[in-house]
Image: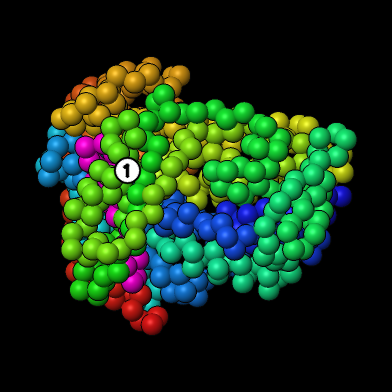
């Protein structure tokens, strides 16, 4: 059997990998993590995707334990500001669509808009975000348990009708890596703090061991490359080609700040904010003790100096004297993610800019698929092929979804935003967009392979960005709209009740301090 795993690189990717493998296999597989003190993690992966909840559940970690230790907060949505026009915002919520008589509530809304805010009319999360609310009550109960409502007046034809409110987290990536390091080491993971100076291969070209500066050789059966954009094992040693996404996603740089603020006064909005700029967009991520913020931009349209100045202007006086972290991003993916006995996890595998907070999602998906495809002494090629296909399809799907953000944004006020409408579209997206003009996206018409996003995400982006003309289904003109009106009214009533009764995020997390 494959019994010895060597993880090269720490940070979020390395310690998520080590902790998950030991949770899955216990002492039946030994795990060693080797990381350098000299090479720091990027440390700005502070917003996540809703599937991350499953990672912590799998490890048996309770929110009340790990979240305060990582200054974590809840994330219910992404708030997009100025993507349509200056002063406009909308939410992409982690909240599935309600269905009335076989059609989603956004379908009904589009046929007769109650206001110009589909996200407030059709979903609850927008109200929670606007009012800085926690999704949990002070006793820890999730609010969705109170929202059964009276739906006896109309037919339910889809299983989507159940109320499900997934959510994600914001956290300090450095603190999380440290927390998972302690978790993994307490369960037997070996931690080697040293510099890798050589990667050795056997006569077949498989990795045999890594040589460290002080600790000598570290041998293993399976090696996991968590060395970030450097991709020391997969990219440099095994020379696996890289597939660039730059032709469709030009943002290749970022500058980030950690801004200490009085969050009790400022409040904790339970969402990531993405504010469109002249050459990209700025993220704002509220943690319990500070905000994380950064400008993601295309170097063809802005210099690093211009980007840093714009970010500091955006933050205001609180940014004075804070050190800026400049990051050059490698946008795309490895052609294969598992080659011989080496699997790349995290940035060494691929990255599709942080617009929808998919960096940690890619880590989690890669680890989960590795466990499902874990090899034995035969090293079945079918397992490697299946793994590589699933990971590549996932990243390609996220690429397509992000390209849609720029293409469908109504904003066209400078060359950057005009060019966003002229770039080539990934295969299949142009045809899908044409379908969506006359029928909102559903499970049958979005990217067909697993990539983390459901059809409601596409619906929200198209309705919010406003750059593509959409038509409601003609069939709705032949249906009785009274049930849909009832559901829209119910959304408004439930939102008002939650606004009145839920604690703020700050109130909820302050109790753990």
Main SS, magenta region, reads strand
Instruction: Give the residue at x 71% y 35%.
Output: 238
Q: Residue at x 64, y 37 (%)?
A: 235
**Mark 1, other Cα within 10 Å: few <14 / some 14–19 / many ≥20:** some
Q: Secondary structure at mark 1?
A: helix
Which stretch is magenta? Answer: 273-291
Which one is nearer the viewer's eye here, 116 or 99? 116
Picture coordinates of residue 316, whole percent (x, y): 18, 59
Report the quarter where the C terminus lies: bottom left
Q: Determine if the magenta segment contains residue 281.
A: yes
Q: Quadrant of residue 215?
A: bottom right
**Residue holding disc 1:** 304
Image coordinates of residue 110 in percent, x first then y, are 20, 33
Question: Which residue is at 13% across, 41% downward?
Answer: 86
Quadrant of residue 338 within the rendered picture: top right
The quadrant where residue 441 appears: top left
Left or right of 386 on screen, residue 179 = left
Residue 428 is inside the magenta segment:
no
Q: Residue at x 43, y 74 (%)?
A: 68
């Amino acid at each position: 059997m494959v019994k010895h795993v060597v993880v090269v690189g720490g940070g979020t990717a390395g310690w998520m990998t080590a902790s998950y493998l030991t949770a899955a296999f216990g002492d039946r597989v030994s795990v060693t993590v080797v990381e350098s003190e000299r090479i720091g993690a990027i440390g700005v992966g502070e917003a996540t995707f809703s599937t991350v909840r499953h990672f912590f559940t799998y490890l048996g970690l309770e929110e009340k334990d790990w979240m305060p230790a990582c200054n974590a907060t809840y994330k219910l949505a992404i708030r997009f500001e100025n993507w349509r026009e200056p002063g406009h915002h909308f939410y992409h919520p982690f909240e599935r669509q309600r269905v009335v008589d076989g059609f989603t509530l956004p379908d009904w809304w589009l046929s007769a808009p109650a206001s110009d805010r589909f996200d407030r009319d059709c979903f609850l999360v927008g109200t929670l975000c606007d009012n800085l609310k926690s999704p949990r009550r002070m006793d820890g109960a999730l609010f969705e348990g109170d929202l059964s409502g009276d739906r006896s007046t109309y037919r339910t034809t889809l299983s989507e009708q159940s109320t499900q409110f997934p959510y994600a987290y914001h956290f300090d990536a450095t603190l999380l890596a440290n927390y998972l390091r302690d978790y993994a080491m307490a369960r037997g993971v070996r931690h080697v703090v040293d510099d890798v100076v050589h990667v050795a291969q056997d006569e077949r070209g498989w990795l045999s061991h890594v040589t460290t500066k002080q600790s000598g050789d570290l041998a293993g059966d399976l090696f996991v490359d968590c060395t970030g954009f450097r991709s020391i094992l997969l990219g440099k040693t095994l020379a696996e080609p890289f597939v660039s996404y730059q032709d469709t996603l030009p943002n290749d740089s970022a500058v980030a700040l950690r801004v200490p603020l009085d969050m009790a006064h400022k409040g904790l909005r339970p969402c990531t904010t993405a504010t469109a700029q002249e050459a990209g967009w700025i993220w704002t991520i509220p943690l319990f003790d500070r905000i994380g913020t950064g400008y993601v931009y295309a170097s063809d349209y802005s210099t690093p100096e211009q980007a840093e100045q714009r970010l500091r202007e955006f933050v205001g006086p609180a940014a004075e004297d804070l050190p800026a972290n400049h990051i050059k991003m490698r946008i795309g993916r490895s052609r294969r993610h598992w080659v011989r006995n080496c699997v790349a996890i995290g940035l060494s595998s691929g990255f599709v800019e942080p617009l929808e907070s998919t960096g940690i999602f890619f880590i989690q998906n890669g680890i989960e698929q590795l466990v499902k495809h874990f090899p034995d002494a035969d090293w079945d090629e079918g397992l490697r092929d299946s793994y590589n296909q699933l990971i590549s399809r996932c990243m390609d799907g996220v690429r397509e979804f992000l390209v849609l953000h720029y293409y469908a944004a109504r904003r066209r006020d400078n060359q950057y935003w005009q060019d966003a409408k002229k770039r080539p579209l990934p295969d299949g997206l142009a045809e899908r967009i044409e379908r969506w003009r006359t029928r909102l996206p559903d499970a049958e018409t979005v990217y067909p392979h697993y990539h983390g996003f459901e059809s409601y995400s596409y619906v929200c982006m198209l309705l919010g960005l406003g750059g593509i003309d959409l038509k409601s289904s003609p069939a709705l003109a032949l249906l009785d709209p009274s049930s849909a009106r009832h559901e829209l009214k119910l959304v408004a009533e439930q939102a008002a009740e939650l606004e009145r009764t839920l604690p703020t995020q700050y109130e909820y997390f302050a109790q753990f301090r």
